[in-house]
Image (tube, grey):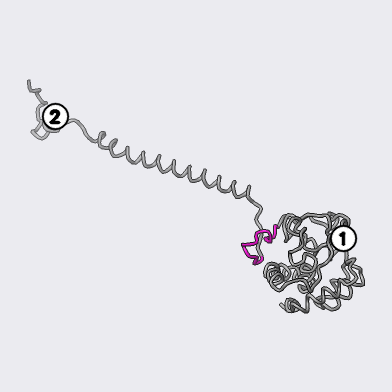
């Protein structure tokens, strides 16, 4: 049976009256994707924040960075550790022991190939130590070559000691740390040497007078190494 419409109702009113309102349904259908996208974006943003926080925490835990001064990456032991020498002092260096095991090499027995390899490995270290402490690179390099036998001394690889008698009986985590400890030793035990600046000849005389080494020919051997391999060129760099 047809329902009777109130008096005055038109045909168009009849159509409208017979249809169910669709506005609310449409609005809900259009709103659902928007709400989903909002929730998804919020979730992604939270995970990004969590990932970023985890990355920062990881970097903090790995915070043992150091600044390289141009060392070859093939020699990671030469990379300076910024925190390693923050508290290092010469008081940590033990008294001389087993000095006889650390006699300097005979310069005539050093081969050109040995020394060239040593120079290539440590020349930047010597220059950096000269700039920081005022020790001539020629002197420092000659000492390392002579006392480690150009890295051929049997104890050098196991102890990372390149400066022989003054560090007898002591091991170092890396060759660079040994080089730095030696510069600190010169600075604290032989401060008068630093006033000689880059005059290698005066350094040789002073080292002999101060009995730096038990070898009576130590200064002349250093001079022979400097002259033979022209190490004085490093003092001008």
Q: Is 66 placed above or below 116 here?
A: above
Residue displayed at 91% across by 68% down: 211
Residue 212: horizontal and vertical position, in percent?
88, 67
Between residue 132 and residue 228, name the one nearer to us: 228
Return the residue at label 1. Answer: 100
Q: Main secondary structure of the magenta part?
A: loop
Give the quarter of the image for residue 223.
bottom right
Disc 2 vs disc 1: Cβ atoms closer than 8 Å?
Answer: no
Q: Residues within 10 Å of mark 2 (few under 14, many from 20)?
A: few
Give the magenta part as a residue range: 69-81
Q: Element type at marker 2?
A: helix
Please say whether residue 116 is visible from this viewpoint: yes
Residue displayed at 16% across by 31% down: 19
Mark closer to the chain start, 2 or 1:
2
Return the residue at label 2. Answer: 18
Please say whether residue 235 is visible from this viewpoint: no
Residue 11: horizontal and vertical position, in percent?
8, 33
Between residue 196 and residue 234, name the one nearer to us: 234
Taking 175 as reference, is 17 left or right?
left
Q: Which mark is residue 21?
A: none
Residue 116: horizontal and vertical position, in percent?
69, 72
Q: Is 236 placed above or below 121 here?
A: below
Q: Residues within 10 Å of mark 1 (few under 14, many from 20)?
A: few
Tell how many labels. Answer: 2
Taking 22 as reference, is 148 left or right?
right
Give the quarter of the image for residue 15.
top left
Q: Quadrant of the N terminus?
A: top left
């Amino acid at each position: 049976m047809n329902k009777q419409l109130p008096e005055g109702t038109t045909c168009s009113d009849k159509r409208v009256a017979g249809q169910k309102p669709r506005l609310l349904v449409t609005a809900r259908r259009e709103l659902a994707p928007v709400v989903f996208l909002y929730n998804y974006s919020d979730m992604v943003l939270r995970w990004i924040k969590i990932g970023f926080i985890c990355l920062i925490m990881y970097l903090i835990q790995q915070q043992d960075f150091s600044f390289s001064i141009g060392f070859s990456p093939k020699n990671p032991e030469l990379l300076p550790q910024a925190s390693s020498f923050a508290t290092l002092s010469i008081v940590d260096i033990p008294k001389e022991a087993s000095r006889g095991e650390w006699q300097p090499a005979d310069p005539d027995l050093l081969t050109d190939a040995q020394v060239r390899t040593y120079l290539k490995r440590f020349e930047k270290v010597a220059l950096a130590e000269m700039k920081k402490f005022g020790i001539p690179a020629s002197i420092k390099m000659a000492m390392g070559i002579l006392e480690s036998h150009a890295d051929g001394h049997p104890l050098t690889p196991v102890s990372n000691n390149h400066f022989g008698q003054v560090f007898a009986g002591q091991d170092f985590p890396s060759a660079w740390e040994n080089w730095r400890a030696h510069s600190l030793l010169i600075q604290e035990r032989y401060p008068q040497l630093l006033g000689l600046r880059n005059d290698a000849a005066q350094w040789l005389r002073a080292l002999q007078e101060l009995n730096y080494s038990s070898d009576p020919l130590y200064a002349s051997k250093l001079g022979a190494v400097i002259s033979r391999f022209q190490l004085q060129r490093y003092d001008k760099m």
